[in-house]
Image: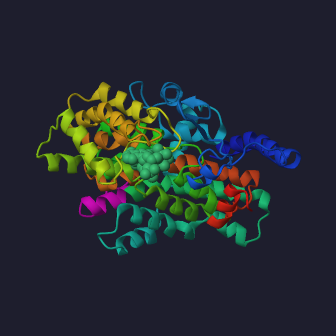
Amino acid sequence: MEYIKNRFYQKASKWTVDYQRLKKDHSDKVIAQVTIGQVLTGMKGVPSLVTDTSKLDANEGIRFRGYSIPELREKLPRLNKEGEPLPEGLFYLMLVGEIPDRDDVLNISKDWATRSHVPQHTFDVIESMPRNSKPMTQFSMAILSMATESIFQKAYRAGVNKKYYWDTTYEDVMNLIARLPRIAAYIYRREFHNGNHIEPNPHLDWAGNLAHMMGHDSEEIKRLLRLYMVIHADHEGGNVSAHTAHLVGSALSNPYYAYSAAMLGLAGPLHGYANQEVINWIFDMQKSLYTENPTKEQIADYCHKTLKDGRVIPGYGHAVLRKTDPRFTAQKEFAEKYIKNDNLINIVNTLYEVVPGVLKETGKVNNPWPNVDAYSGSLLYHYGIKEYTFYTVLFGVSRALGVLASLITDRLYGMPIERPTSHPLEWYIKQAEGTA
Ligand code: HAX
């Protein structure tokens, strides 16, 4: 599969020249000012990262190398006419910067199948963890345990020239992505199917094989997981999981370390764990209202109660977006096309009518609209993946595509260790008062 690596290198070498030229000739150019408000609210809007794979617009949502989600669903190769695009194609697009043809995508599927062997000690690490370890803990630990396999780390220790760091990073990234479905499915089957594991099928695509190894072999679930893996793959560079992978990777930690750390960020309830919280919260609502079919008014009351209790409504709001997340819309359209009358999906749709108004009433929520996590759980649940404490792992499998593609370019560009400046609170107070 050398040709994809070579194609990436041809394209990315030109970007590297731009990166180095910008650094050399324009380092003094001022591009933004930073306010105290930005420092105190999570550095929102501070341009400080270089990420080529995707860009998030507050109103329009995500574009991957310039393509919106509807455009990707139209243009990326798929296995059959009716299906969803293969995530392999999105990975190629994010890495190389061009829409791949069908052969490129099938070749990546094959390449990942040949790289997908998970070392036995990784399964042993998973097995050694108590049954009450959260699936995301197991997932992150399993990824970390594979650092023994890092080709980058071995090459670094052997004294490889820094201009070749990207090459072994590429190999690690391809191996790591290839193995994630097996690891995720293993954790799932251990946790929810008495350790009755299912071997991979090397003839299946990456997402199809994940569904197969989880024991959900229908074409419908495979189609859903392909969509799921595409829409969760990247969200520019500043979100917690992407930023963590970049930050840890900037110390030249190997890709297994960087991605294991990223997964611990994704596991937080304000980030990827929100996809579990949504379902949990809806079930709590049904229990507390003694009905499976709450009315619009009951749902609105429950939302008010959640806010009164000092909690967030999961699946709503975003640090950057200011409109309905197109990843939410893609899933809603999928449900409208394929699913007739599902109770949980009906509730998710009613929430969409109710929650934005409730959040607007607070006067403080900057984005009252739903994000990707508001819909995803209800679709998985509908197709029989009901074990919602596992949902963030599926998000984690997908997120690898974007952030690890970025890690390869980080290394090719020769990005330095990341090291922003911090000050004591007193320093900011003096700045505000003009007494510094
Ligand atoms: N419910 C209740 N209050 C909310 C809220 C929500 N869904 N979204 C924001 N707020 C509150 C914030 O907690 C904050 O309150 P305080 O001033 O009292 O601290 C205020 O509104 C302003 O916050 P913001 O500027 O609108 O939002 P942030 O950028 O600080 O946070 C979050 C963005 C996504 C973390 C936030 O909207 C949230 O907590 N949402 C619910 C959890 C969620 O769905 N997370 C997933 C986000 C998408 C993602 O990363 N997926 O992986």
x, y percent for residue 299: 22, 39
x, y percent for residue 130: 32, 73
| 111 vs 230: above or below | below
Q: Is residue 435 magenta?
A: no
Residue name at image x 32 percent, y 39 percent:
221
Give the image's coloring scheme: rainbow
Which region is colored magenta? 185-203
x, y percent for residue 346: 23, 33
Q: Please tell me how many numbered marks the rendered image carries.
A: 0
Seen from the viewer's position, the closer of residues 151 and 63 is 63
Seen from the viewer's position, the closer of residues 316 and 104 is 316
Query: Seen in the image, is 323 located left or right of residue 216?
Result: right
Which residue is outermost to the left?
A: 290
Res. 136 image quadrant: bottom left
Quarter occupied by the C terminus: bottom right
Seen from the viewer's position, the closer of residues 194 and 414 is 414
x, y percent for residue 318: 47, 43
- The answer to whether residue 271 of the structure is visible from this angle is no
Q: Is residue 200 magenta?
A: yes
Res. 415 image quadrant: bottom right
Query: Seen in the image, is 282 located left or right of residue 181?
Result: left
Residue name at image x 59 percent, y 32 percent:
100
Query: Seen in the image, is 75 located left or right of residue 199?
Result: right
- The answer to whether residue 238 of the structure is visible from this angle is yes
